[in-house]
């Protein structure tokens, strides 16, 4: 009797993995870079299979479920789990023993639904469709199906991915179950390498510029794949650095539960934007005037980079870590200013590590750079007959979040520190400005939507701001998401009472909003 289709497909994938391993060992003349990629893929597959097989030994088939929404990560997960089942099929009679949970979205793409149906038919999947939130859905599975563990396609670069490991119990306040993450340490390129190397079908939306799929209401094509003619490259052509893994989700608007909290023109978190975090008790107590924030906003705006968040917080590790964790997962980049020196209240480096979920590690490169700086300072002191300065302990500055890059510009003595998408700048204004220019250019290179040109128009009128309230609201609503409108009252002896600023990336839309405002103001006797 022929094997059930899913078991058969899993066995075929197992054989394909083994075949590729054999080919790599035999074909020594392959280009080194190609071998390196393949070696990495094989290692990822083995680690994922180890996790899956461990789970299959711990739980009975009826006690497990797999989260499957038709996305690329879920597709990889599904095939790996099928391969794992094929490797232990003495315990499994059919793939239908494993429930596939699909949390339905009312605004789901038709292409996603079609792909899920194809998988269901091809592999005889037992798909349980739920129209509830994740928490209630898990409770339903536990109460009605006896589910004790869920296979999930979460990766470290996903929101909250930094908080879990390959086996993680459910969060406090949720029903009790085990979360299993076989591809937790996979990168975006690994996902596509797996799908393409093993010729695994995937949802066709990924060939149309989408890199991360949600519902129609909260998913757009990724701007980083947009061509000059307006077309989009397929998702597998998006190249991301280690520090840019989060960018695959930049076309996703954030959601809370099943309802979107991001609306056109009213987004709290803009994916093509930067968040600034100023750190220091001295700023909050007014001992030092914060000139860094205004300087950074003005400079980044000039580069066409939108600053969507500005936060000033004290020297407290947990507060800094929480801010870094939240902002780094919602923005293109985060810039911290202050707290990277050698003193007891310089806590930013450790806090960034906590916020990104990475360990601290001693940097030999940083030690060499700081040793050279200390030698230069001491030499200058001796030349000026001042004797050596008091030795300053740089050990603390050499302990960096694991994966931190030291970006040293030519002619500069101190590097710009970057861990993933977080840039850590000093708080001293003179040094902050030097590194801001470097960070701004790095961010600009990382985002195609940066380097944009903003078009701005101003109106000065003799009407008090309260008289313009309704009109400004109408114009803002009509041009939501296209033109930002701000009004600022005058309180001096100027004949003007209000200045209105209209700003946007499309000059035509700015001009239209200006004309609407001028025409309406005529009726108010401005």
Image: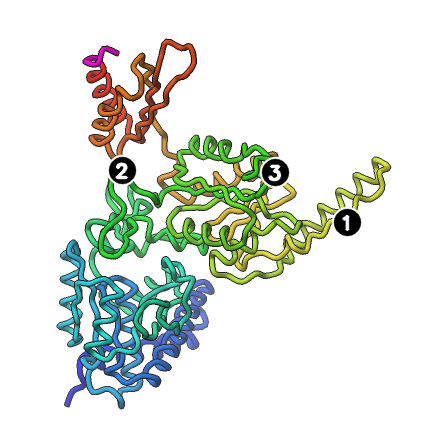
Q: Please state the horizontal and vertical placement of residue 212, each as a whole percent of the image.
A: 28, 55
Left or right: where does residue 403 sit relative to residue 328? right
Q: Main secondary structure of the magenta part?
A: loop
**Residue identifier under label 3:** 428
Q: Secondary structure at mark 2?
A: loop
**Residue identifier under label 2:** 265
Left or right: where does residue 354 sit relative to residue 221? right
Q: Mark 1 near mark 2, Cβ–Cβ under 8 Å?
A: no
Q: Residues within 10 Å of mark 3 (few under 14, many from 20)?
A: few
Q: Please state the horizontal and vertical placement of residue 113, each as a whole percent of the image.
A: 15, 61
Which quarter of the rendering shows the N terminus?
Answer: bottom left
Q: State the residue in front, 126 or 104.
A: 104
Q: Please state the horizontal and vertical placement of residue 81, each as a whole percent of the image.
A: 29, 76
- The stretch of residues the image draws in magenta is 522-526
When asked about the image quadrant of residue 133, the answer is bottom left
The residue sitting at 60% across, 41% down in the picture is: 410
Q: Secondary structure at mark 3?
A: loop
In the rendered image, residue 434 lying in the magenta stretch gets the answer no
Where 29 falls versus 215 (above or below)?
Answer: below
Left or right: where does residue 286 sit relative to residue 84? right
The residue sitting at 31% across, 80% down in the picture is: 84
Q: Residues within 10 Å of mark 1 (few under 14, many from 20)?
A: few
Where 503 falls versus 244 (above or below)?
Answer: above
């Amino acid at each position: 009797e022929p094997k059930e289709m899913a078991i058969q497909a899993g066995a075929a994938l197992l054989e394909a993995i083994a075949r590729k391993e054999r080919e790599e060992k035999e074909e020594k003349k392959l280009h080194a870079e190609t071998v390196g990629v393949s070696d990495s893929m094989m290692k990822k597959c083995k680690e994922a299979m180890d996790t899956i097989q461990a789970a299959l030994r711990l739980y009975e088939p009826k006690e497990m479920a797999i989260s499957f929404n038709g996305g690329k990560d879920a597709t990889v997960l599904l095939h790996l789990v099928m391969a794992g089942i094929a490797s232990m099929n003495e315990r499994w009679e059919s793939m239908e023993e494993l429930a596939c949970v699909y949390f339905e979205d009312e605004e789901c793409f038709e292409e996603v639904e079609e792909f899920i149906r194809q998988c269901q038919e091809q592999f005889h999947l037992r798909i349980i469709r739920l129209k509830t939130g994740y928490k209630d859905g898990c409770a339903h599975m536990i109460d009605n199906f006896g589910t004790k563990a869920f296979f999930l396609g979460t990766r470290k670069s996903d929101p909250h991915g930094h908080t879990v490991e390959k086996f993680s119990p459910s969060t406090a306040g949720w029903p009790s179950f085990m979360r299993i993450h076989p591809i937790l340490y996979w990168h975006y390129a690994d996902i596509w390498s797996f799908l393409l190397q093993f010729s695994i079908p995937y949802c066709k939306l990924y060939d149309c510029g989408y890199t991360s799929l949600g519902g129609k209401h909260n998913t757009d094509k990724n701007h980083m794949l947009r061509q000059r003619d307006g077309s989009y490259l397929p998702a597998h052509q998006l190249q991301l650095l280690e520090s840019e893994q989060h960018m695959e989700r930049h076309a996703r608007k954030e959601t809370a539960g099943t309802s979107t909290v991001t609306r056109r023109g009213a987004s709290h978190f803009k994916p093509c934007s930067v968040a600034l975090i100023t750190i220091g008790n001295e700023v909050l107590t007014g001992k030092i005037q914060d000139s860094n924030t205004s300087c950074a906003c003005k400079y980044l705006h000039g580069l066409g980079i939108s600053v969507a968040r500005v936060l000033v917080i004290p020297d407290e590790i947990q507060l800094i870590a929480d801010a870094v964790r939240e902002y780094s997962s919602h923005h293109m980049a985060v810039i911290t200013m202050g707290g990277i020196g050698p003193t007891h209240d310089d806590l930013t480096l450790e806090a960034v590590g906590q916020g990104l979920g990475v360990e601290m590690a001693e940097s030999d490169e940083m030690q060499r750079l700081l040793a050279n700086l200390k030698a230069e300072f001491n030499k200058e002191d001796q030349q000026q007959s001042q004797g050596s300065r008091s030795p300053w302990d740089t050990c603390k500055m050499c302990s960096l979040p694991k994966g931190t890059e030291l970006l040293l510009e030519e002619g500069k003595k101190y590097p710009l520190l970057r861990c993933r998408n977080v840039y850590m700048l000093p708080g001293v204004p003179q040094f902050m400005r030097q590194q801001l220019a470097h960070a701004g250019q790095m961010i600009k290179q990382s985002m195609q939507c940066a380097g944009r040109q903003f078009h701005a128009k101003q109106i000065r009128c003799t009407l008090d701001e309260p008289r313009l309230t309704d009109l400004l609201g109408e114009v803002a609503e009509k041009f939501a998401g296209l033109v930002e409108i701000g009004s600022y009252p005058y309180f001096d002896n100027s004949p003007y009472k209000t200045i209105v600023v209209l700003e946007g990336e499309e000059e035509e839309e700015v001009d239209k909003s200006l004309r609407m405002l001028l025409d309406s103001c005529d009726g108010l006797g401005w």
